[in-house]
Amino acid sequence: MGSQQDLLPTPATAAGRDALDAILARPARALIALDFDGTLAPIVPDPEQARAHPEAVPALAVLAPLVHRIAVITGRPADVAVRYGGFSGAEGLEHLVVLGHYGAERWDAVTRSVEAPPVDPGVAAAREELPTLLDELGVGESNGTWIEEKGRAVAVHTRRASDPQAAFDTLREPLGALAERHGLVLEPGRLVLELRPAGMDKGVALREYVRETDVAAVLFAGDDLGDLAAFEAVEELRTQGVFGLLVCSGSSEVPQLAERADVVVDGPQGVVALLRAIAEAAELR
């Protein structure tokens, strides 16, 4: 049987190959940044049932002592991602950071507490209008859509609707107008539409954290449209002398990420295998 290192993929681009070499050569100067849903946790019909892949925490615990920092960047509230991920108190993850709500919240494994600014009032106003709007459009919760209260954001899921894509398409324009009325932005995802304050995205969160940590190389792994902003941030960081590796947690629902990624893996199980392969290869250098 081959080692985990044998599973280490060859990035499709020169920039990706250079970044992987930099991570393996100097892991202590590398940041491993990861989305949660669809990347560390499989996508499920009910977001409240999402949990990290059973091998995610063990894989992160093997890699974490070798690299400068591991950051989970998610649209979920930070404490929810910590709970669903099983991160709190996990041995080996003492320096893990979770940037929740696209960086508006921060949880770290040392203090086990969340730092966060006040909630935008536009989110509460939009949340109050959503049930009536969905019913008027004929795609209310009785038809399978589901409103997720995320504290600093609110999302409408269509995965459980009788025709998920049709419901998604019906909602996209009206929810965009609702977001605009309340000074929010609409973020489409994998059969989900999220309304959140402007200026919050994974690209902003990643750029700010890279500046704070002063690392030489960054790996970012994601699976959804909301991760494109982080991909763009990595591409920008490359122009500033930071090595960047783009990883897509593969999904036929979002081909845009696979087209831009240096490495495409098979969902969360592929992400776990990649993390273990990087850890083994770095230890052998």
Image (cartoon, grey):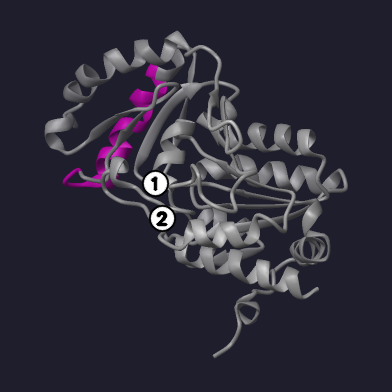
Secondary structure of the residue carrying numbered label 1: loop
Q: Which label was assigned to residue 253?
A: 2
The N terminus lies in quadrant: bottom right
Which image quarter: residue 131? top left
What residue sits right under mark 1 in the picture?
Answer: 190
- The answer to whether 63 appears left or right of 40 in the picture is right
Q: Residue at x 54, y 69 (%)?
A: 273
Most distant residue in the bottom direction: 1
Which image quarter: residue 5? bottom right
> The disc labelled 1 sits on which kind of residue?
Arg
- Give yes or no for contact between labels 1 and 2 (Cβ–Cβ under 8 Å): yes
Q: Residue at x 14, y 36 (%)?
A: 143
Residue 67 horizontal/vertical position (percent): 72, 55
Numbered label tally: 2
In the depicted view, which residue is nearer to us: 93 or 3? Answer: 93
Residue 122 horizontal/vertical position (percent): 43, 11
Within 10 Å of disc 1 (Cα), the crowding (few <14, some 14-19, many 20+) is some
Highlighted magenta segment, given as a residue range: 161-178
In the depicted view, which residue is nearer to us: 2 or 254? Answer: 2
